Image: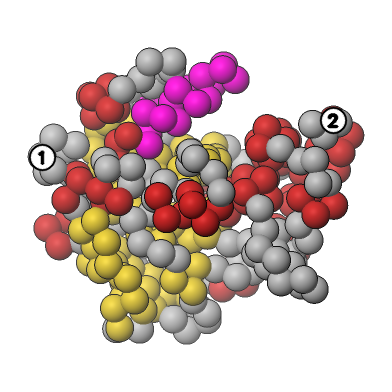
């Protein structure tokens, strides 16, 4: 376990890296004994720095929900991070590329809670009962910690990703909101287009066999920290496509069929 001074220093690095739009090197390389718990401790300290600037938490994201991503990261469960208020962007608009370092796009469903969820013991059915509506979402992930080391080209470890807000950097909500019992959420599908070309397709069942499963997992996971999911929270349930890279000038468009579309352009 890292000591409190080191945790605070690493959180400050990420806080400054996000503002300066520059990457830092792998924490796990500098601190080989780093653990998942250390990653979340750094993340929580970074949140405190953002809150001191007046930022607020609008919800949470869940990542690494697909089996393929868990195997590649050598973990057996998802990860999570807060969604800060300045990470939300309007659908259909232009997003300034300078807000990001190396953005990639993922296709997700967002759960908008009408009631709080506090673990332990939260179930999939509890999540559906507490959800006001589900809406299509695009998550913009980024890497304040290098995805690949600049010299060795080694990929970063899950401890690094967790520290780095689980890679979250932006959220675009859109499409048609639906009640969670109005459709079979497992069979919600989407096609992600970049500049008019289909880059990725997927089904929401790829998220732990049901996207609400991840929300239940999250409510139970944060309970030991005396935390809960609150009414009004936006919870990103996890991507059901691989990340798609994007640069200035790229237009992203996700077609969710009956649930409508989400789109934006980087400028």
Q: Residues within 10 Å of mark 1 (few under 14, many from 20)?
A: few
Question: Which of pointers 1 and 2 lies earlier in the amino acid sequence?
Answer: 2
Quadrant of the rendering where the N terminus is positioned = top right
Point out which mark residue 4 bears.
2
Q: Residue at x 35, y 20 (%)?
A: 122
Q: In the displayed orientation, state which residue is furthest to the right.
A: 5
Please indicate whether residue 257 sits to the left or right of residue 161 in the image. Answer: left
Asked if 221 appears above or below 243 in the picture, the reply is above
**Could you say where residue 60 lies in the image, as x and y percent from the top left?**
48, 39
- Residue 237 point in image, percent of width and height: 37, 43
Query: How many other residues sit within 10 Å of disc 2, few (<14), some (14-19) or many (≥20)?
Result: few
Q: Nearer the viewer, residue 249 or 125?
A: 125
Q: In x, y percent, where is residue 173?
A: 35, 54
37 displayed left or right of 167: right
Q: Is residue 21 in view?
A: no
Residue at which label 1 appears: 182
């Amino acid at each position: 376990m890292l000591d409190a001074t080191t945790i605070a220093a690493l959180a400050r690095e990420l806080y400054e890296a996000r503002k300066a739009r520059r990457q830092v090197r792998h924490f796990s390389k500098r601190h080989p004994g780093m653990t998942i718990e250390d990653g979340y401790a750094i993340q929580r300290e970074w949140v405190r720095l953002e809150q001191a600037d007046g930022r607020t938490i609008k919800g949470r994201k869940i990542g690494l929900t697909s089996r393929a991503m868990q195997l590649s990261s050598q973990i057996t469960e998802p990860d999570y991070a807060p969604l800060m208020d300045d990470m939300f962007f309007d659908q259909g608009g232009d997003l300034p590329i300078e807000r990001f370092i190396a953005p990639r796009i993922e296709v997700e469903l967002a759960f908008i809670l009408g009631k709080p969820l506090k673990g332990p013991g939260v179930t999939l059915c509890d999540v559906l009962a507490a959800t006001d509506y589900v809406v299509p979402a695009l998550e913009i992930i980024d890497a304040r910690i290098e995805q690949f080391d600049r010299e060795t080209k080694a990929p970063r470890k899950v401890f690094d990703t967790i520290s780095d807000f689980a890679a979250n950097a932006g959220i675009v909500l859109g499409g048609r909101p639906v009640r969670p019992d109005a459709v079979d959420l497992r069979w919600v599908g989407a096609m992600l287009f970049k500049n008019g070309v289909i880059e990725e397709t997927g089904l929401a069942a790829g998220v732990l066999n049901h996207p609400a499963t991840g929300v239940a997992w999250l409510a139970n996971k944060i309970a030991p920290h005396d935390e809960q999911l609150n009414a009004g929270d936006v919870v990103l349930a996890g991507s059901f496509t691989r990340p798609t890279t994007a640069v200035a000038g790229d237009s992203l468009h996700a077609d969710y069929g009956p649930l409508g579309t989400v789109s934006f352009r980087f400028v």
